[in-house]
Amino acid sequence: MTVLAHLLSVFQHSASYNRHDLARPGVILWTDGERLWEKAVRLIASSCPGFFQLDENGLGEFSGPSTWVRYQLGKWSGESVPVVYLPGIYRHQFRRAAGFPEVARHLYALQFQGQFCSQLNGKDWTPAAILASEDGGLGLRVARDRATQQALGDQLEAVLRTPVAALRGKQLEASDFHDLAISDPVRLVLDWMNAPEKAAKDWPESQYAAFLAYCKKDLGFHPEKDGLITAVEKVTSAAGKWANVWNRFEDLAQSLPGVRKALDLVQPADLFSISSNPRIPATNRRLEEELRKGLVDSGNLPPSKARAALLTLATVHSSRAGSVYARLGEAPLAKASTHLQRMLAGMQTGVAGTDCASIGEAYLAGAWVVDAEARRAWESARKSEDCGAVSAALRATYLPWLEDLAFRLQDCASGYPVRSRQDARDHAPEPGTVILFVDGLRADLAKELMESMAQDGLQIEATAQWSALPSVTATAKPAWNPLAKALHGHEASA
């Protein structure tokens, strides 16, 4: 049994209850006020079905804000009781609603629907407590000095992967936890590249010595003699076992800013050329500049030639949309090119129809993708020069498509389906039905919402109807509102 397996058993024990007196808990609340488990939370989540983490900064694979966590709990149908990890939240903060952390306010009531994962004394489980506690922990002997506690936190993932039997029979100190880290030497190489001076200064002597031995034997590289520049040259070459180092960097790039900065030290092969190596930042920058110029130039072409030019650009650059530099936000135009490519594919399908009904059916059947991908292409750009480049491409291709569709619909105005409130759809209230009104829900956004809900396992039935014309608040609401006849005002805004 590993330490991780024991931690998971602690979760299961927290879900135990007296079936004669209580209902099955709906959730396990795992508070971690000091954020001691954050470094290993991805490893824990991968081994624990129904694991969700509170994260006010946005959505992740298993994390999100409190409203997202509540939603995930509401649709959880697994056999195990779901676990909600609450970094930065202490158990004692659940005692009073007043003063409860705002970021977790939607989770306050969960304490009445589930149980806490905590020690018998009510305190949060810490990594040291899991190892040393005789009451629910492993009962191991762990030194209490600061260096040991720091080492346990630094090597937490390695500790969790370690069999419990390998930790018994001795007093566990900092060096013991650091020795576990050499089991992941590739990560050590990246940590050294991220902060070489800090590694040489802060790493335990035994760990640093093991790291040097690995580099010399397996990578043919001496960190102290060859230096950081040689390391980044070897990483970007990705030859031999250095390919493992690059692949791991791609997975961890956002947490290794020092390595990303060091990659800029790689210079072109000579003064008159720029390397075509896709792992070198200079290559990505050059290709982004080429793509930016190509997008701008497409704005000066007639629509048919502009579409052809954009397809060529997308073929060349869309592969970079999945690169590490795209994930770091350094290839926004490459990401935009993939959306432009899908937008153009939707245009080629066309929008068949000779009246409002048939045009509407064709739009919902597939043409909505054109609007959606044009919006996504625009969203990919952030800097003004990138926004200008994407705008030029959209004006040359998307705008003519919009105008053509608008003129075709205008020709069908005499047969427009909704000409009065009597033509509009009537929503009669029914027991058990909730009607949610969204002001200005574009059809392409509605289709995306449907796809998202379907991926969450919901059964979707969709119907569509034309809006009042023009489809703005001042016109549409009075036209459809049952109180329309009672509304008065000399101007539309009134």
Image (spheres, grey):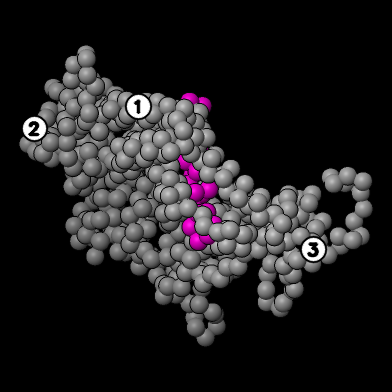
The numbered mark at residue 290 is: 1
Residues drawn in magenta? 362-385
Left or right of 234? Residue 75 is right
The numbered mark at residue 365 is: none
> How far is mark 2 from mark 3, CA to CA?
78 Å
* Residue 100 within the magenta-colored segment of the rendering: no
Label 2: few (<14), some (14–19) or many (≥20) C-alpha neighbours in 10 Å: few
Residue behind mark 2: 220
What amino acid is at disc 1? Glu
Q: Main secondary structure of the magenta part?
A: helix
Residue behind mark 3: 421
Residue sitting at 45 percent across and 30 percent down? 301
- The answer to whether residue 61 of the structure is visible from this angle is yes
* Residue 363 within the magenta-colored segment of the rendering: yes
What amino acid is at disc 2? Gly
Residue sitting at 70 percent across and 60 percent down? 415
What amino acid is at disc 3? Arg
Nearest to viewer (mark 1 / mark 3): 3
Nearest to viewer (mark 2 / mark 3): 3
Residue sitting at 38 percent across and 66 percent down? 49
Residue 20 is situated, as x and y percent measured from the top left of the image, at: 52, 86
Q: Relative to residue 273, is residue 426 depicted above or below?
A: below
